[in-house]
């Protein structure tokens, strides 16, 4: 089961990422301001994560976190915050069927940054590169 855990988590993540835009657009169409949508999502996320940390006994890991790890976690959080705010703003102004594919070009940026800064620890092979460019081409065809 441990070998399937990563791929199964990725599938669940994909399903949730696929459903979230529908619910977000419905909320925006019913008058929720984009920043309120972000705030609701953030508070809900904090609550769920706090329960997870509490019930899985991860509080010690949280307290003993390395500063270097915390720095990168904060950078990731900052990027995620900008992404979510701009996503909700885009959803409030555009069509879900157009906004979602455009936001899905992020593998291109991930590959570029990974190649530039992590090439010793992360191997980017031909198939990964080809798959990423196929995703981008698919998005371009969709838009």
Image: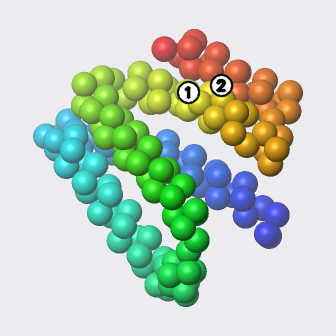
Q: Nearer the viewer, residue 28 or 44?
A: 44
Q: Nearer the viewer, residue 35 or 142?
A: 35
Q: Quadrant of residue 90?
A: top left
Q: Which residue corresponds to the image point at 36% horizontal and 35% vertical from the top-left? A: 87
Position of residue 19 measured from the top left corner of the image (x, y, whole percent): 45, 45
Q: Which residue corresponds to the image point at 47% horizontal and 50% vertical from the top-left? A: 75
Q: Residue furthest left?
A: 31
Mark 1 and mark 2: Cα distance apart in space: 8 Å
Q: Which residue is mark 2?
A: 135
Q: Is residue 68 left or right of residue 34?
A: right
Q: Which residue is mark 1?
A: 105
Q: Quadrant of residue 125?
A: top right
Q: Quadrant of the N terminus?
A: bottom right
Does residue 34 sit above or below 53 in this rendering?
above
Structural crowding at the residue carrying mark 1, measured as other residues with C-alpha within 10 Å and reported as few (<14), some (14–19) or many (≥20): some
**Do labels 1 and 2 touch, CB within 8 Å?**
yes
Q: Which residue corresponds to the image point at 71% horizontal and 21% vertical from the top-left? A: 134
Q: Nearer the viewer, residue 21 or 119?
A: 119
Q: Is residue 111 visible?
A: no
């Amino acid at each position: 089961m441990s070998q399937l855990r990563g791929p199964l988590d990725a599938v669940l993540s994909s399903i949730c990422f696929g459903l979230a835009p529908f619910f977000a657009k419905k909320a925006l169409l019913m008058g929720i301001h984009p920043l309120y949508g972000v705030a609701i999502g953030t508070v809900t996320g904090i609550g769920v994560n706090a329960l997870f940390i509490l019930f899985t006994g991860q509080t010690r890991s949280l307290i003993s976190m390395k500063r270097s790890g915390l720095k990168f976690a904060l950078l990731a959080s900052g990027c995620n915050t900008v992404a979510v705010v701009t996503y909700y703003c885009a959803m409030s102004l555009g069509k879900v069927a157009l906004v979602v594919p455009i936001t899905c070009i992020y593998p291109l940026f991930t590959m570029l940054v990974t190649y530039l800064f992590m090439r010793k620890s992360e191997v980017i092979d031909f198939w990964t590169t080809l798959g990423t460019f196929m995703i981008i081409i698919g998005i371009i065809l969709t838009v």
